Each structure stands twice: as structure tokens, then as C-alpha cells.
Amino acid sequence: MTVYLTDIDAVTLDFYSTLVYHKQGRGRGAMLMEYLQDHGLESDPWEHQVLYDVFEQHATDYSPHFSAEDTQRYLTRLTRRLFKRLNVCVSEDAIADHVANVWRVLGPTSLAVFPDALRCLETLRRAGYKMAVISNWQCGLQHFCTELGLGELLDYVFASAEVGCAKPDPRIFRDACSRLETPCHRVLHVGDSVVDDIEGARGAGMQAVLVSRDDAAPAVDVPMIPDLERISDMLVPTEEGP
């Protein structure tokens, strides 16, 4: 049964598993470890914090609009940081041999946008809703969104590494609502995690909807949709807008 929501002026969405997914069906860490092993390179064990450390300067030191030469220089530095962080022993001259493949594993081309996600954002944009991404992600998520073709459809992108707190902390949600210049109770958040997205958003006073692409019902009372295209069906415009 469709749940109808009124008095919504803005929509925020989670990033991974809501808007995008891994093309290979595996995380970037697993793919990187496999790549290093295939090339006979020993490393420290993988931990998710590696991504946060390696991408610490991505928001400020990189641009999707770099020239080919500037992109190559930046990605070489990123690969060097990665190998140092993981204690991968490789000569300076050999780093260049791995730059393209490392970026293929860690960069935005390792992800794909759900078709329904793109259609949803386009529909909401035409309807006049403000939109943002709120994600537990590394610095530079705005660049990922731009390179995946989502950037122009979003008003803001909030990555936990840049905000300084992570979902389900209500502060990251409240910060997003403030930047959207919209009261929390008039913002709908959509995500795939009951704890991070639903409980976090509700804790900030927002409305929330769970996207469950496998249609598995959670053990909580929460509106649920199987795909993002259902969002526009749920929103009932008020006389004032959006």
C-alpha cells in the first residue's frame, strides 16, 4: 500500500546501495586486495579506514575537470599514498604501472548508478524539490557524484568525512537541512539502512523511507519502497510548492 507524504520540500538520499552499487558485486577493498595479490604485491591487511586515509585530500586536491596531465599527477600521488598506507613495497619507478588500475578499482568507475535512481532524481528535479546526498563516505564524494552523472541533479553532497560526523548521528542530517534551508520536518530522507538512515533521520526530526530492493521487510514500522521511482508517487505537493 502506498504511503502518501505531504509538506515535503526537499529529499535527501543515501549514496551507496541507494543510488549506486559496485559493478563487480564486491567492495573496493576486496577488489584491491585481489589486484595486489595477482601482481605479487604483499600488503598489510585491508581495513575500511584505508579509504578514508587515502581520500583525505580528494575533495580539495582533485577535480573532475583536470587536464589529462593533472589527473595523472594527482592519481600518481594517490597511488603512492595508498601503497605507503598499506606498506606495499614497490619502487618509485613502478608506481606508474599501477596508477590506472588502482583508480579503476577505487574510483567512481568501480560504481554504477541504479537506473531507477537516475530517473527518480530527474523526476524530483523537474518537480522542483531540493535534493542532497547524505552518506557515510570519504572526502570528495561530490566528485564521485559528478563523474557518475549525478552532480547536476543534486543541490548538495554531504560526506561524513567532510562533515565530521557519521550517520546515524542526527547532526549530519540537521546540517543538511540547514544547508538546504528547509525545516527538518519538511525533508524526506531515503536510504537502505534502518539504523543509519531511518533512525538517524528520524532522530533529526525528518521523515524517512526505507528502500529495500530485495523487498525484505524490516522488523520496524517504516514506510518501505522496492525502488526509488516510487518516491514521486508518495509525495503530495502542497499548495505552496515545491
Image (cartoon, rainbow, N blue to C red):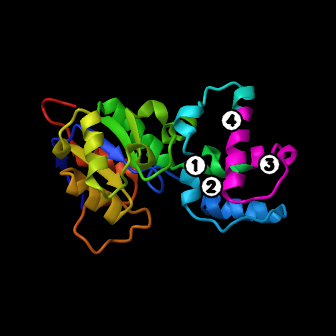
Give the residue pinned by disc 2.
Answer: 23
- Whichever of callouts 1 and 3 sits on the residue coming sooner in the sequence is 3
Disc 2 versus disc 4: nearer the observer: 4
Taking the spot 60% from the left edge, 45% from the top edge, the residue there is 108
The location of residue 97, given as percent across then percent down, is 84, 46
Give the residue pinned by disc 1.
Answer: 112
* First to last magenta residue range: 72-101
Using the rendered image of the protein, determine whether residue 148 is visible from the camera's viewpoint: no
Q: Secondary structure at mark 3?
A: loop
In the image, taking residue 82 as reference, residue 233 lies left or right, namely left
The location of residue 13, given as percent across then percent down, is 37, 47
Going by the numbered disc 2, the residue's amino acid type is Lys
- Whichever of callouts 4 and 1 sits on the residue coming sooner in the sequence is 4
- In depth, the one of 25 and 175 nearer the eye is 175
Magenta span: chief secondary structure: helix
Mark 1 touches mark 2? (CB < 8 Å): yes
Going by the numbered disc 1, the residue's amino acid type is Ala
Mark 1 and mark 2: span between their CA atoms?
A: 6 Å
Mark 4 touches mark 3? (CB < 8 Å): no
Going by the numbered disc 4, the residue's amino acid type is Tyr
Q: Which mark is residue 98?
A: 3
Going by the numbered disc 3, the residue's amino acid type is His
Specify the quadrant of the image occupied by residue 78: top right
- Whichever of callouts 1 and 2 sits on the residue coming sooner in the sequence is 2
Mark 4 touches mark 1? (CB < 8 Å): no
Taking the spot 53% from the left edge, 33% from the top edge, the residue there is 60
